[in-house]
Image: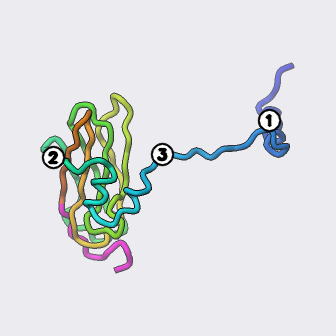
Amino acid sequence: MRMTRRQVLKGAGAAVVAGLLKPDPAHADWNKAAFEAKTVDEVLKAIGATGAVESDQIAVTAPDIAENGAVVPVTITSKLAGTDSIAIIGEKNPFPLVAVFNLMNGSEGYVSTRIKMETTSNVIAIVKAGDKVFKAHKEVKVTIGGYGG
């Protein structure tokens, strides 16, 4: 007997209702201490990047002036071989760690997103490549703060 897609889905739904299958939401590993840190130094400690070295192999692209701090486009490009992760920090945000992107082996060291910034400050990129940690930054002037100010 050949089952249709509809029959399979109905059967799976019945199994969930009967308690035979329990849906388990996917949970990404995240560093709670790092995202709750209130200073850049606390963030760097929590993500293991206290000894980060400035690198010209990392480019932080963001506007010189952000008219609205609620949506600041940021792109980080790493030319470092073996880039494992890229973290973005908003230096003067209430909670500075904005995002951490873990890259799979062989992935291009590139991320692009929009972040929220409270006031004029540096956007800091932290890049882990192999067993080393590197950083780069760019100052962004914010005219209207993204946190309502």
Residue 29: give its label: 3
- Tell which residue pokes out farthest to the bottom in this image: 149
| Mark positioned earlier in the residue sequence (2 or 3) | 3
Q: Which amino acid does the dot numbered 2 rest on?
A: Val
Q: Is residue 116 left or right of residue 63?
A: right
**Vertical arrangement, residue 47 with respect to residue 121, above or below:** above
**Residue extent of the magenta highlight:** 139-149
| Mark positioned earlier in the residue sequence (3 or 1) | 1
Q: Which amino acid does the dot numbered 3 rest on?
A: Asp
**Which image quarter is the C terminus in?**
bottom left
Disc 1: CA contacts within 10 A as few (<14), some (14-19) or many (>=20): few
Instruction: Identify the residue at horizontal 87%, vertical 19% (top origin).
Output: 1
In depth, the one of 31 and 102 nearer the eye is: 31
Q: Which amino acid does the dot numbered 1 rest on?
A: Arg
| Mark positioned earlier in the residue sequence (1 or 2) | 1
The question of residue 109 being in magenta is answered with no
Instruction: Identify the residue at horizontal 27%, vertical 73% (top origin).
Output: 119
**Vertical arrangement, residue 29 with respect to residue 121, above or below:** above
Disc 2: CA contacts within 10 A as few (<14), some (14-19) or many (>=20): few
CB contact under 8 Å: marks 1 and 2: no
Query: Image quadrant of residue 102?
Result: top left
Residue 146 % position (x, y)? 35, 72
What residue did someone put label 1 on? Answer: 6
CA gap, disc 3 and disc 1 = 34 Å
Residue 53: give its label: 2
